[in-house]
Amino acid sequence: MGSIGRLVRTTAFKLSLVYLVVFSGLTLFLGLYISNNTAELLDRQIADDISQEIASLNDQYQRGGLRQLVDSVEMRSRRPGASLYLVADPSGQTVVGNVADPPLAVLGLPDGRSTEVSYQRLDDDAGRRYLAVVRVFGLPGGFKLLVGRDIGEVNDLRQVIFDASKYAIVVIVVLGFLSWFFVARSVLKRVEAVAETSRQIMSGDLTRRLAVTGSGDEFDNLALSLNEMLDRIEALMTGLKEVSDNIAHDLKTPLARLHNRLEEILRRDGPVEDYRVGLEASLEEADKLIQVFDAVLKIARMEAGSSGDSVGDLDAGDVLNEIGELYQPVVEDAGGLLVVERGESVAFRGNRTLISQALANLIDNAIKYASPVEGDGRTLRIALSARSLGGELRLAVADNGPGIAAIDRERVLQRFVRLDESRSREGSGLGLSLVAAIAKMHGGRIELSDGAPGLTATLCLPLGRERTGGVADNGGNDDGREQGTEGQAPSPSA
């Protein structure tokens, strides 16, 4: 009973009931309409036939009087068919015709008036009575002429149409309930599957997905859309867990260091200047932690597409020249050479601040990880370039350092990933993650490839259309130096 109750409460049942009532009413209306119009048509046809018979018999009477009329009626009475003929004398006795014992009241009707009467056929020994429409006319000498038409066929036709309508309604009701039962069960099964999957997901199993039957119906389209949403939610939850784990792991040491330094300052009994130096070092450590948190929030906002920064028309060459002028002294101070290979002028749409920050992070990573070590015998060289290829703008940063192994190139784009397991270099492993988030926000991507030698990091941005993601809030003027990852940032090969 519980299952039937659920079926009755479903939308499928309610819709099936509405359709059932509508189609049953329509069938009944059509049956009545056809029955009535057919009967009216047959009634008119019967009236016309009677009128023609009367006109023909009247012509016979005009030609030969009562004698010829009787002969004509006698001849016509012998023909098979539904027509009725009768000539009665003044006493009501039959002179000639195919009607037995007509009611006297009928013979007394006004001339030419159509009347429905019951009668008995002369050739029917069973005594059955039939219905007919007749007209009666008076003749000279008190004789009466009756002409009519049997209407049993009309009534039979009406009954056939009525029975057909009745059976059609019964069939519609039965088929409607059968269709509702199977459709409702099918729909209810899909809905219950969605509810069960939802409960499993709410219980913590984010790997569950809605079943897709492959029929391409509305439920499949809904399941595909919800599965895409669940994939996105799972990715975000996984990323949140990874961020939480990485923050707990990577920030534990600097926080502990900051705590120990402050404790040491409190225990120290010395001049004020010593306190000042200790506090300045602690503030510097706190600033680095704030930068890490800012970078994490910035990446999260860009990945969520919730940012207020606007985009505008930019020229790739102008952006590269601006970054080159800013970082030329920085690279030279590091003992290297920065080359800007502007190439063709490429117009695109983007956020200047975020694109510049992405390139700045890549250059900072190149300085940090591609700089020669003692005895290396080489000079750091970083090259910037911009070109269009296949409907994309490719902004590249290339260096001549040791590069990144192919197996690690996808991994270094994740947050807090550092290839320097010893953490001997400063950084939090957020630089390339921020670059990847900026690229994704602009509808593009970042590619890391072998620069032979070194690493080439390419920012691939779409041309000729608006970006698909939201532009992230730039936040502060963080140049990315403290968020660099172990891997270098790409740029066209030098």
Image (cartoon, rainbow, N blue to C red):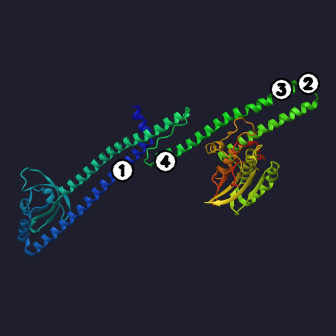
> Residue 487 location, x and y as percent?
69, 44
Which residue position is annotated with label 1? 23
Q: Earlier in the sequence, mark 2 or mark 3?
A: 3
Q: Which mark is residue 269?
A: 2
Dividing the picture into quadrants, the one containing residue 89 is: bottom left
- Type of amino acid under label 1: Phe
Callout 4 environment at 10 Å: few (<14), some (14 to 19), or many (20+)? some
Q: Which residue is mark 4?
A: 221
Mark 4 or mark 2, whichever is nearer to me: 2
- Secondary element at image label 1: helix
- Circle 3 — which element? helix
Question: CB atoms at circles 3 and 4 under 8 Å apart?
Answer: no
Q: CA distance from mark 1 to mark 2?
A: 97 Å
The residues bearing labels 3 and 1 have C-alpha atoms spaced at a distance of: 86 Å
Q: Secondary structure at mark 4?
A: helix
Viewer-side label of 4, 1: 4
Q: Nearer the viewer, residue 21 or 387?
A: 387
Residue at 29 percent across and 57 percent down: it is 34
